[in-house]
């Protein structure tokens, strides 16, 4: 019975989720990531691994007044065909990590030596948090002074980003050209010199190589050429926290259809959290109205367009 209610609710909410998708992909910059989702594998006595893909539109970093939003999509695997299908209608910049499954999305293939940020339709902006994390792990594990200095140099770039957050794109671009590009050029020279002195198979060499290899460096430095781009993909990583918390509350999705319904609910709940409204109050508001709401005005029920009624205060009893 509960499963039937969830399915019926998903059917009612599906026009809103489609509108969220349209809105997220309508922006010029998105943040993309994925996380595993256990899915029941009937007849085999175990679960298999499905994936929830997240796509975030968040333009607050460059002073936009457009509301942030997140769209989740479920897929039974992690192959590159899934983000390619999800983003078939997207034109712009994708912030992501270095996962090889995304390569085909940007026209990058392993046999090509020459790297590029991506084709005209889609450009890649790689996440500096991933590069920093690999180096920080080497500092923790090896107490390496080289890793420590590399982290400090990357942190100096983040300091610039914190100072210019909220400025308009032109102002951000100007600050990055004047302040960040010289630091990036010096960081590349410094890392290249250190790498030449390390054993090729050492863990520290692998961490450095992740940052400066030709397939990554152009995309890591893309952000200094675009005032609307971000230095990291943290927006996507933050959107996955609710999924990680949810996995503690349930063991698995019952089927691929269950994974799709989970993606729909995570989309709406995530949008509510991004704009600071109560997800439960929003869903109650929508369920009370959507059955009679005109489909051509579905935009009115998007989380950022809804004006939730204020909770009623308990009546104050008059003194006898």
Image (cartoon, helix red, strand yellow):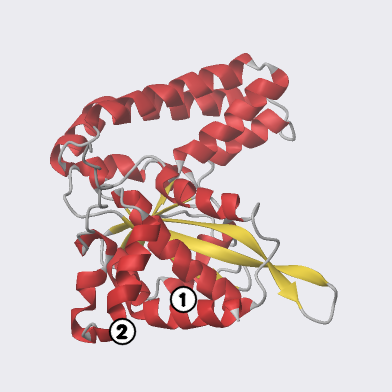
- Among the 4 quarters of the image, the one containing residue 175: top left
**Is residue 29 found left or right of 268 in the rendered image?**
left
* Relative to 11, residue 234 above or below: above
**Dot label at residue 85:** 1
Q: Quadrant of the N terminus?
A: bottom right
Instruction: Report if residue 212 is visible in the image.
Output: no
Give yes or no for contact between labels 2 and 1 (Cβ–Cβ under 8 Å): no
Q: Quadrant of the C terminus?
A: top left
How dense is the environment of label 2, judged by Cα within 10 Å: few (below 14), some, or many (20 and up)? few
**Is residue 201 found left or right of 149 in the rendered image?**
right
Q: Residue at x 35, y 70 (%)?
A: 21
The percent coordinates of residue 84 (x first, y second) are: 47, 72
**Dot label at residue 291:** 2
Instruction: Report if residue 297 is visible in the image.
Output: yes
The percent coordinates of residue 260 (x first, y second) are: 53, 74
Identify the element where label 2 is drawn. Answer: helix
Q: Residue at x 44, y 72 (%)?
A: 86
Q: Residue at x 37, y 66 (%)?
A: 283
The percent coordinates of residue 176 (x first, y second) are: 25, 32
């Amino acid at each position: 019975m509960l499963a039937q209610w969830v399915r019926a609710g998903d059917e009612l909410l599906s026009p809103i989720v489609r509108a969220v998708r349209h809105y997220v992909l309508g922006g010029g910059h998105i943040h993309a990531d994925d996380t595993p989702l256990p899915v029941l594998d009937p007849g085999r006595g175990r679960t298999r691994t499905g994936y929830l893909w997240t796509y975030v539109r968040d333009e607050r970093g460059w002073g936009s007044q457009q509301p942030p939003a997140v769209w989740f999509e479920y897929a039974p695997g992690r192959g590159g065909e899934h983000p390619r299908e999800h983003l078939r209608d997207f034109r712009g910049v994708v912030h992501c990590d270095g996962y090889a499954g995304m390569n085909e999305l940007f026209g990058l293939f392993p046999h090509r030596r020459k790297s590029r940020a991506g084709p005209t339709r889609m450009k890649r902006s790689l996440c500096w948090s991933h590069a920093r994390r690999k180096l920080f792990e080497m500092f923790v594990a090896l107490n390496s002074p080289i890793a420590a200095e590399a982290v400090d140099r990357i942190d100096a770039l983040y300091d610039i980003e914190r100072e210019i957050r909220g400025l308009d794109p032109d102002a951000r671009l100007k600050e990055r050209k004047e302040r960040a590009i010289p630091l990036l050029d010096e960081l590349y020279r410094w890392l290249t010199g250190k790498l030449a002195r390390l054993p090729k198979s050492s863990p520290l060499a692998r961490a450095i190589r992740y940052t400066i290899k030709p397939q990554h460096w152009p995309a890591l430095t893309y952000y200094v050429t675009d005032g609307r781009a971000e230095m990291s993909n943290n927006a996507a990583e933050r959107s996955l926290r609710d999924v990680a918390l949810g996995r503690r509350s349930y063991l698995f999705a019952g089927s691929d259809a269950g994974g799709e319904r989970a993606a729909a609910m995570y989309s709406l709940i995530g949008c509510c959290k991004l704009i600071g409204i109560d997800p439960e109050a929003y869903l109650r508001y929508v369920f009370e109205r959507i059955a009679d709401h005109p489909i051509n005005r579905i935009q009115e029920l998007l989380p950022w367009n809804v004006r939730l009624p204020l909770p009623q205060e308990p009546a104050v009893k008059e003194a006898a």
